[in-house]
Image (cartoon, rainbow, N blue to C red):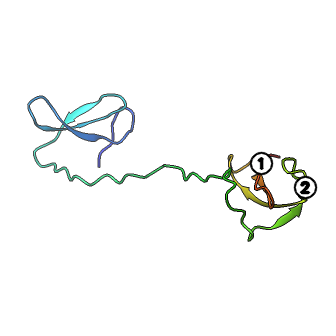
Amino acid sequence: MDFCPDCGKLLQTDKNKSGNQILICLKCGYKRDLEENENVTFTEEISHDLTKELTIVMDGSDVDTTKPTKDLYCTKCEKNQKVSFWMVQTRSADESPTRFFRCTVCSDTWREYD
């Protein structure tokens, strides 16, 4: 492992026009040839999957009876006063979580922010 003397970034391996191995800085463009006694070991790059998990919360097909309920008026069916609720951290960690409510009769779902 070697670092760029100009900017301090990690040098990457590449090949020059003649096909010889060189070390190159991807930030500032610094290049240097490998010395005769210098070996380069290739390691497999680990890829991190940064895909966020998507949860569908507006699907009203099933009302989860295991969630806690609260007395709250549903504006859609205008009958029920019981809704199930849960909280999800939809914004950054230093902000309050989003509260979701689902009517136990008509399955209408809405959210409330702080």
**Disc on res. 97:** none
- In the displayed image of the protein, which residue is found farthest to the bottom? 66
Crowding at label 2, few (<14), some or many (≥20) Cα neighbours within 10 Å?
A: few
Q: Position of residue 73 (x, y in %)?
A: 91, 53
Give the tally of numbered discs.
2
Could you tell me which residue is drawn at 67 percent across and 57 percent down? 61
Which numbered disc, 2 or 1, marks the residue that appears first in the sequence? Answer: 2
Residue with the mark numbered 2: 79
Q: CA distance from mark 2 to mark 1?
A: 19 Å
Is disc 2 in contact with disc 1, using a CB cutoff of under 8 Å? no
**66 is higher (above) or lower (below) than 52:** below
Could you tell me which residue is drawn at 74 percent across and 57 percent down? 87
**Label 2: which secondary element:** loop
Q: Seen in the image, is 29 located left or right of residue 72?
A: left
**15 is higher (above) or lower (below) than 44:** above
Q: Position of residue 72 (x, y in %)?
A: 90, 56
| Quadrant assignment, res 79 | bottom right
Under mark 1, the amino acid is: Arg
* Camera-side mark, 2 or 1: 2
Residue with the mark numbered 1: 111
Residue placed most toward the observer, 99 or 78: 78
Q: Position of residue 7 (x, y in %)?
A: 39, 33
| Quadrant assignment, res 105 | bottom right
| Quadrant assignment, res 4 | top left
Under mark 2, the amino acid is: Lys
Residue placed most toward the observer, 87 or 63: 63
Q: Position of residue 22 (x, y in %)?
A: 19, 37
Crowding at label 1, few (<14), some or many (≥20) Cα neighbours within 10 Å?
A: some
**Label 1: which secondary element:** strand
Could you tell me which residue is drawn at 75 percent across and 56 percent down? 107
